[in-house]
């Protein structure tokens, strides 16, 4: 039985999906939350937020994500990073999932991926859990009611957490599966309740499709100066590096917090909401994000709370360090109504250095920017992926390897071309450790990071005197108002200077070893900017 507003010529049965019980099309937030609570999926917390746990999957499952090896994509997919699934195995998986769905109740959300109408992707998301529909309704962009009447999806996502894949039968690795079929324009997700798989699948689609049109997809947050979209800044970085926190600057207008495109017209957000980490969330340091945790229909994932008062514990990571909240962009008071910006004036690459040897900010040449973009050095933060329990130094090319279906050089060359065409000042910002490595040192003070970023974005930092870092070759400011000068020279923050030198040499060697695979694909000036 059907309920809700939908294109009468594009119901599920028109897509060959039949035999379901109740199908709810495009329910609004309150309806979805009521349904989720009634089904026992979660509870309503303070301020009307929705509190939920996701079982054993509290982060992404990148090893369970596959791309179907069809002729149209065989020469363009980065197969080393995107394991293939055979087309016949996918067909069996799809048939088995449709059989699994028969008789069940499902929510359908018709949504847009991309704020720029010229480049958006129309996505239908079919979910077994009502709260997943609430989540993706926050995270993608919501059509106007009149647009639903003619909505035809470019791609369809089906998410059934109770479906268990069979590796032998379906050509996957475990009971969990995320399978993308570009020819069938279909994504199947099974065996995980972690809602982030929904939005990351859309990112993967856009990251594949947009470069064909000369558009640079970026795993980044973005903001612009108040009333001046031309003064746009983008923040590259993996989970846990501070993308969401640093872009939600009350003195600037937020464009978006996780994924953007850079087109011939400027910057545009892929999303309609934010998905922020909440561990250690401080109401003084991050008031805008903190406030969303007690707003109606904000999805609170995997946080411990008092069962009587529903008070959230922002420090208890017993379920996961990857506790999160999902909310629409308009919950941030200074969010852009259009989610559009100009060509980036400043490009910030965020890294979480568990070695404790990188300075809090460094200025990069265009060649160095491409080098660090391809390197994507950071530390996987506890809980972001299954099995990660403490910061783990890693290199994730383009600051988003799990979502990059094409070879890294495609994105690196696109970025370089955009920088050359439009000009941008590039910065590397370390939000990781200082005064020692993880376990000895301390996290970089967010107050100092904000002060350095403010100076970088308003143009005052470039007026300071810079020194060349002897290990990494980039330029580091010697002073900045409001920041202890000692912090700007990491070696000075270590009690044991010899230990710093050992750690720095170790990281230099890691950079060098990691970059060897890109050398055949890059120009001489990028080779000259290489570390080590």
Image (tube, grey):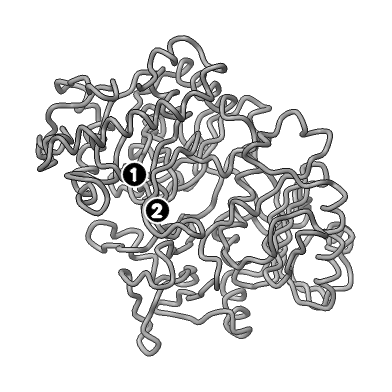
Circle 1 residues within 10 Å: few <14, some 14–19, many ≥20: many
Residue shown at 81%/65% (left/top)?
Answer: 97
Residue shown at 80%/57% (left/top)?
Answer: 170
The answer to whether residue 375 is seen in the rendering is yes
Residue shown at 40%/37% (left/top)?
Answer: 377
Residue 33 lies, in percent from the top left, at 57, 76
Q: In which quadrant will I find the C terminus?
A: top left
Q: In which quadrant will I find the N terminus?
A: bottom right
Residue 321 lies, in percent from the top left, at 40, 63
Q: Which secondary structure, mark 1? A: loop
In this rendering, the answer to whether 47 lies above or below 492 is below
Q: Are marks 1 and 2 in contact (CB under 8 Å)?
A: yes
- Left or right of 106, for residue 287: left
Q: Which secondary structure, mark 2? A: loop
Give the quadrant of residue 360.
Answer: top left
Q: Which mark is residue 381?
A: 2
- Left or right of 449, for residue 74: right
Q: Which mark is residue 352?
A: 1
Which comes before the other along the chain, label 1 or label 2?
Answer: 1
Give the spatial CA distance, label 1 vs label 2.
8 Å
Give the quadrant of residue 252.
Answer: top left
| Front-lying residue, 103 or 170 | 170
| Front-lying residue, 526 or 455 | 526
Furthest toward the top, the residue is: 524
Q: Which mark is residue 337?
A: none
The answer to whether residue 109 is seen in the rendering is no
Residue shown at 55%/66% (left/top)?
Answer: 57
């Amino acid at each position: 039985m059907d309920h809700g507003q939908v294109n009468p010529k594009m119901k599920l049965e028109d897509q060959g999906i039949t035999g379901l019980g109740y199908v709810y099309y495009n329910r609004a937030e309150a309806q979805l939350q009521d349904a989720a609570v009634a089904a026992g999926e979660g509870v309503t917390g303070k301020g009307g937020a929705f509190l939920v746990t996701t079982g054993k999957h509290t982060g992404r499952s990148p090893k369970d994500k596959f791309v179907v090896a069809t002729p149209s994509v065989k020469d363009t997919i980065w197969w080393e990073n995107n394991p293939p699934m055979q087309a016949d195995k996918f067909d069996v998986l799809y048939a088995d999932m449709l059989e699994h769905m028969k008789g069940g109740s499902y929510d359908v959300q018709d949504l847009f991926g991309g704020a720029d109408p010229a480049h958006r992707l129309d996505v239908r998301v079919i979910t077994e859990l009502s709260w997943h529909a609430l989540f993706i309704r926050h995270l993608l962009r919501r059509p106007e009611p009149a647009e639903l009447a003619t909505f035809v999806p470019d791609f369809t996502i089906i998410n059934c957490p109770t479906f268990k894949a069979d590796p032998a039968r379906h050509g996957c690795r475990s009971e969990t599966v995320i399978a993308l079929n570009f020819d069938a324009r279909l994504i199947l997700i099974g065996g995980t309740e972690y809602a982030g798989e929904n939005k990351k699948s859309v990112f993967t689609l856009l990251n594949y499709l947009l470069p064909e049109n000369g558009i640079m997809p970026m795993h980044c947050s973005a903001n612009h100066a108040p009333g001046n979209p031309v003064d746009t800044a983008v923040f590259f970085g993996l989970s846990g590096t501070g993308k969401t926190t640093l872009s939600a600057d009350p003195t600037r207008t937020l464009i978006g917090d996780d994924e953007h495109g850079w087109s011939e017209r400027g910057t545009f957000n892929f999303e309609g909401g934010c998905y922020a980490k909440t561990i250690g969330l401080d109401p003084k340091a991050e008031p805008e994000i903190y406030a969303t945790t007690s707003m109606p229909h904000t999805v609170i994932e995997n946080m411990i709370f008092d069962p009587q008062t529903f008070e959230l514990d922002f420090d208890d990571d017993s379920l996961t360090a990857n506790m999160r909240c999902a909310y629409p962009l308009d919950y941030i008071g200074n969010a852009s109504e259009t989610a559009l910006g100009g060509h980036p004036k400043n490009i910030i690459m965020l890294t979480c250095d568990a070695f404790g040897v990188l300075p809090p900010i460094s200025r990069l040449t265009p060649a160095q920017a491409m080098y660090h973009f391809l390197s994507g050095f950071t530390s996987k933060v506890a809980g972001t992926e299954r099995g990660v329990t403490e910061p783990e130094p890693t290199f994730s090319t383009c600051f988003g390897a799990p979502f990059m279906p094409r070879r890294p050089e495609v994105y690196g060359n696109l970025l370089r071309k955009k920088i050359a065409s439009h000009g941008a000042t590039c910065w590397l910002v370390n939000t990781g450790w200082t005064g020692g490595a993880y376990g000895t040192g301390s996290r970089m003070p967010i107050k100092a990071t904000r002060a350095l970023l403010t100076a970088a974005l308003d143009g005052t930092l470039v007026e300071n005197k810079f020194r060349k870092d002897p290990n990494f070759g980039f330029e580091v400011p010697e002073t900045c108002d409001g920041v202890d000068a000692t912090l700007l020279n990491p070696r000075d923050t270590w009690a044991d200077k010899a230990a710093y030198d050992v750690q720095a040499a170790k990281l230099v060697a890691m950079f060098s070893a990691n970059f060897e695979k890109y050398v055949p694909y890059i120009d001489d000036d990028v080779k000259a900017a290489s570390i080590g």
